[in-house]
Image: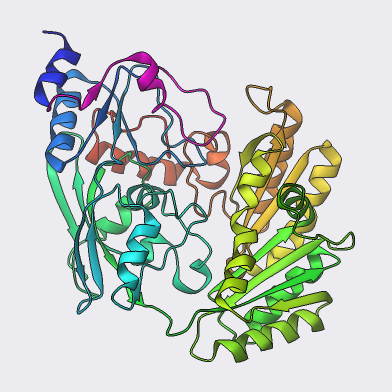
Amino acid sequence: MTAIAELVAALAPGKVVTDPDVADSYARDRTFLEPGKPLAVVLAETRDDVVAVLRWATEHRVPVVPRGAGTGLAGGATAIEGCVVLALHKMTAIKELSPADEIAVVEPGVITADLDRAAREHGLMYAPDPSSYEISTIGGNLATNAGGLRCVKYGVTRDSALGLEVVLADGRVLNTGRRTVKGVTGYDLTGLFVGSEGTLGVITAATVRLRRAPSVYPATIAAEFGSPRDAAAAVAAIIAAGCQPSLLEMLDRNTLKAIDDWRNIGLEASTRAMLIAQSDAADAPAVSERMSELCTANGASFVAVSSSVQEAEELIGVRRMAYQAKERLGKCLVEDVCVPRSALPHMIEKIEAIAARHDVLIATVAHAGDGNLHPVFIFDHNLAEPPPSVWAAADEVFRETLAAGGTLTGEHGVGLLKQRWLSLEAGPTAKEIHHGIKQVFDPLGILNPGKAI
């Protein structure tokens, strides 16, 4: 019996896909990266399926690439040659939702927005809110420690992860964390697995924290500026004034033009940047009015304040359209550098200067409230990968980020795309420690090899 035949025999019929054309459809994420050819794809439906796959993979020394919905932007779920892709999108159970304890226990294939909707039926919400929340999975969010639009107030995915069920490389099941709000028994293994990009184990369930949903729909503002620096100054003013926005996003001119060309949002010729801010506080109308005043005081030419749920959703919708609008223009190298908030104006100006110097189209959005910028390098649809000018521009952006006290990735992960720059941030001691941790959990190196570290 061949190794693949053994895998097929170990699982229920239909769970192992070996047809090359079908398997290829599970081989890539949302990057331009060309994947390797997987031996097979396993459509896992239970923890026992995952256990069986990893026991088999350990026995036969076959690499395993875990995959959620394939919405990643760093190449973390890109198949490598000769691997088995372990697809978890069919594990969609919300196993428990406890209003009393304000927690949920969910499988990795649960769509982020579906968990939030389920929580809101009980007056709660799931706070992490990546732009892809309608299609991304909880497992993928955990694997990359995803952030999102609400992270300025509620933090990233790690801040909502209380405990995990993880299948290790040899098939053992490890339970980390707790159901309680507090708990310091042992090392923080939950925090270690969140953001590990499937290189230490495969998450098969998560206990996540829920929060009280706002009693009224959040008040939203959109402010237009004649320069990105003025918009960044308004961000600083809003934070300094203690407004505590639940969302504070910035879009540059190139991003706004891409959206306007697609959906005709009425972009003015003089608008070089837009801020979209939201408050979900009890006094949200008053806070939104204060944020509006601060935008005007810092050079906003126009400020719109939502007066209904529909208007608020339309304003937020502009932000959520950003990436799809850019994909219409070409292939995208998407980055997610993060700098201290005080360095935000500097980085915005540097990105614009780098784009001009290399004659590269860079469209930038930012989770401005926490200094997380997404410069998207757009290149020709017909090219297999970015041309040298794009790679050179990206290199400059990363180096400027680190010089400003920032980090290479705020929420997308390292994956494959940032491997060439990883040593600039993680020195030899950090690299040695990372590799030591990897050795403990995955001594054969079969879990998502070549990614993250």
Locate residue 22 relative to residue 227 in the image: left or right.
Answer: left
Q: How is the image coloured?
A: rainbow
Location of residue 413 in the rendering, given as x and y in whole percent from the top left corner: 47, 46
Q: Is residue 221 above or below residue 357?
A: below
Q: Quadrant of the C terminus?
A: top left
Which contiguous range is marked in magenta? Answer: 12-37
Q: Nearer the viewer, residue 118 or 167?
A: 118
**Snapshot quadrant of residue 251:** bottom right
Q: Nearer the viewer, residue 320 or 154?
A: 320
**Snapshot quadrant of residue 145:** bottom left
Location of residue 221 in the rendering, given as x and y in whole percent from the top left corner: 66, 76
Locate residue 308 relative to residue 202 in the image: left or right.
Answer: right
Q: Using the rendered image of the protein, determine whether residue 99 is visible from the camera's viewpoint.
A: yes
Q: Could you tell me which residue is drawn at 49 percent across and 53 percent down?
A: 411
Farthest-out residue, right = 270
Q: Could you tell me which residue is drawn at 67 percent across and 88 percent down?
A: 290
Q: Is residue 28 magenta?
A: yes
Location of residue 448 in the rendering, given as x and y in whole percent from the top left corner: 35, 32
**Snapshot quadrant of residue 201:** top left
Q: Is residue 25 above or below residue 138?
A: above
Q: What secondary structure is the magenta-colored segment mainly?
A: loop
Q: Could you tell me which residue is drawn at 63 percent across and 59 percent down?
A: 319
Q: Is residue 5 magenta?
A: no
Q: Nearer the viewer, residue 102 or 83?
A: 102
Q: Could you tell me which residue is drawn at 19 percent across and 15 percent down?
A: 4
Q: Using the rendered image of the protein, determine whether residue 338 is visible from the camera's viewpoint.
A: no
Q: Nearer the viewer, residue 1 or 438?
A: 1
Q: Quadrant of the N terminus?
A: top left
Location of residue 119 in the rendering, given as x and y in whole percent from the top left corner: 31, 69
